[in-house]
Image (tube, rainbow, N blue to C red):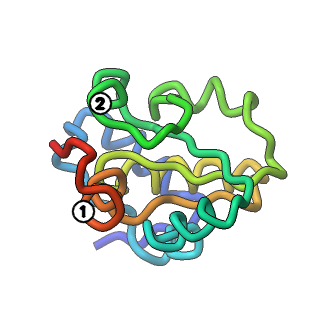
Amino acid sequence: MIAFTDGDCLTWYIMQSAVTLASLSAPQSHCSMRFEITVLQLKEKLDKGERVRLIDVREPFEHEYSNIGGTLMPLNQLRRRFKELDSEEEIVLYCHRGNRSAYAANFLAQRGFKKVKTLVGGINGWSEKIDPSLPRY
């Protein structure tokens, strides 16, 4: 098994681009753990009125089917669109289960984003623990 450093997580993902997203495993915990936020922690921040920028890194059809109000910026567009984001702003990225958003968080952190997090469990976790009325897939 190959161990990756923080800087290698996105490189590994790009090398695996021929593999379908459904078969990708999450980045190893040592390269994503410090960038995580649980659905309960995010709900608490939102309930307190804290400013958090939600970014949905899923595909447009997924966003249309079910979303929690985040700005759509699919993972495959992040490399060219990340400059639209404020590196000083608190950003929470989410996807279906957390894999794609973990890669996105590592990518942004490598570019100087200090307050970037990935939503553990993704929108699926949000539906399970926060809002059961949200469609799951």
Q: Secondary structure at mark 1?
A: helix
Residue at mark 1: 128
Q: Nearer the viewer, mark 1 or mark 2?
A: 1
* Residue at position x 52%, y 38% in the image: 70
Q: Which mark is residue 102?
A: none
* Residue at position x 29%, y 30% in the image: 62
Q: Determine whether 59 is above or below 41 in the image.
A: above
Q: Earlier in the sequence, mark 1 or mark 2?
A: 2
Q: Secondary structure at mark 2?
A: helix
Left or right, 59 with reference to 36: left
Left or right, 95 with reference to 97: right
> x, y percentage for residue 53?
66, 46
Q: Give the total of numbered labels.
A: 2
Q: Amino acid at mark 2?
A: Glu
Task: Compare residues 85 and 123 and report the one nearer the observer.
Answer: 123
* Residue at position x 80%, y 47% in the image: 87
Task: Compare residues 119 and 18 and report the one nearer the observer.
Answer: 119
> x, y percentage for residue 39?
43, 66
Left or right, 32 with reference to 20: right
* Residue at position x 55%, y 41% in the image: 55
Q: Determine whether 65 is above or below 128 in the image.
A: above
Q: Determine whether 49 is above or below 1 in the image.
A: above
Quadrant where the image shows the C terminus? top left
> x, y percentage for residue 17?
32, 36
Around disc 2, counting alpha carbons within 10 Å, would you say few (fewer than 14), some (14 to 19), or many (20 or more)? Answer: some
Q: Amino acid at mark 1?
A: Glu
- Spatial separation of the CA atoms under disc 1 and disc 2: 17 Å
Q: Which mark is residue 62?
A: 2
